[in-house]
């Protein structure tokens, strides 16, 4: 049973970011399912490190997109990302110190991050983009990293 399923409330209407959010969700569920299957230690530490890598890359992609779109709250959003990564690292260290056993606090953090950050924080740049494209008419969006 996954920690969280993808549903329409996580859809922010920006396809490239939806794809990355799905990738994060899949990595979180792999950790959760692994823990329920009794996979601890190094394999668990590796799964969590993989989620960290995906997340760092996603935040960088998202920040590039917001900069490209001239999103006014870019710096606030970047600060929230930095705080999430700091908190993630603290959980990662605690889990490593316990020999690769993820805590309930870690899963609560992941669940909150996905639901609150994507639904409330990420949605703001998505709305900015949608308002901009409505004003400008249809346009072709550039690929991430362009
Ligand atoms: Fe974000
Ligand atoms: Fe995001």
Image (tube, rainbow, N blue to C red):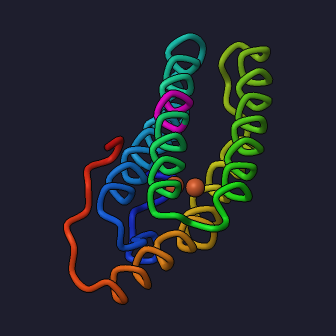
- Which of the image's four quarters has the C terminus? top left
Question: Residue 21 placed where, x, y %?
Answer: 43, 53
The residue nearer to you, when weighing 77 against 87, is 77
Residue drawn at the location 49% of the way across and 51% of the way down: 62
**Residue 54 inside the magenta-drawn segment:** yes
Count of marks, rendered view: 0
When the figure is inspected, residue 108 is found, relative to residue 104, above or below; the finding is below
Tell me which residue sits at (25%, 86%) in the image: 137
Question: Who's the residue at 71% across and 54% down the image?
Answer: 75
Residue found at x 39% / y 63%? 6
Tell whether 98 sits left or right of 121.
Answer: right
Q: Residue 79: x, y in percent? A: 75, 49
Q: Position of residue 144 (x, y in %)?
A: 33, 47
Q: Which residues are magenta?
A: 51-55
Q: Position of residue 37 (x, y in %)?
A: 47, 31
| Ligand 1 rendered quadrant | bottom right
- Looking at the picture, tell me which residue is in the foreground, 3 or 120: 120
Q: Is residue 15 above or below residue 99?
A: below
> Does 124 sit left or right of 92 as displayed?
left
Position above or below: 109 against 118: above
Of helix, strand and loop, which mostly describes the magenta segment?
Answer: helix
Question: In the displayed structure, does residue 131 sit left or right of residue 81?
Answer: left
Q: Quadrant of residue 12?
A: bottom left
Nearest the eye: 1 or 67: 67
* 67 falls in the magenta region: no
């Amino acid at each position: 049973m996954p920690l969280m399923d993808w549903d329409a409330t996580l859809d922010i209407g920006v396809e490239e970011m939806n794809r990355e959010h799905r990738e994060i969700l899949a990595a979180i569920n792999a950790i959760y399912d692994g823990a329920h299957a009794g996979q601890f230690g190094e394999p668990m530490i590796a799964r969590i490190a993989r989620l960290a890598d995906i997340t760092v890359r996603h935040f960088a992609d998202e920040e590039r997109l917001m900069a490209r779109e001239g999103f006014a709250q870019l710096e606030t959003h970047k600060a929230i990302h930095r705080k999430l990564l700091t908190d993630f690292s603290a959980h990662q260290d605690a889990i490593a110190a316990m020999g690769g056993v993820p805590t309930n606090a870690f899963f609560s953090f992941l669940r909150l991050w996905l639901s609150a950050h994507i639904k409330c924080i990420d949605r703001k740049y998505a709305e900015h983009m949608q308002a901009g494209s409505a004003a400008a008419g249809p346009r072709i969006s550039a690929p991430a990293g362009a």
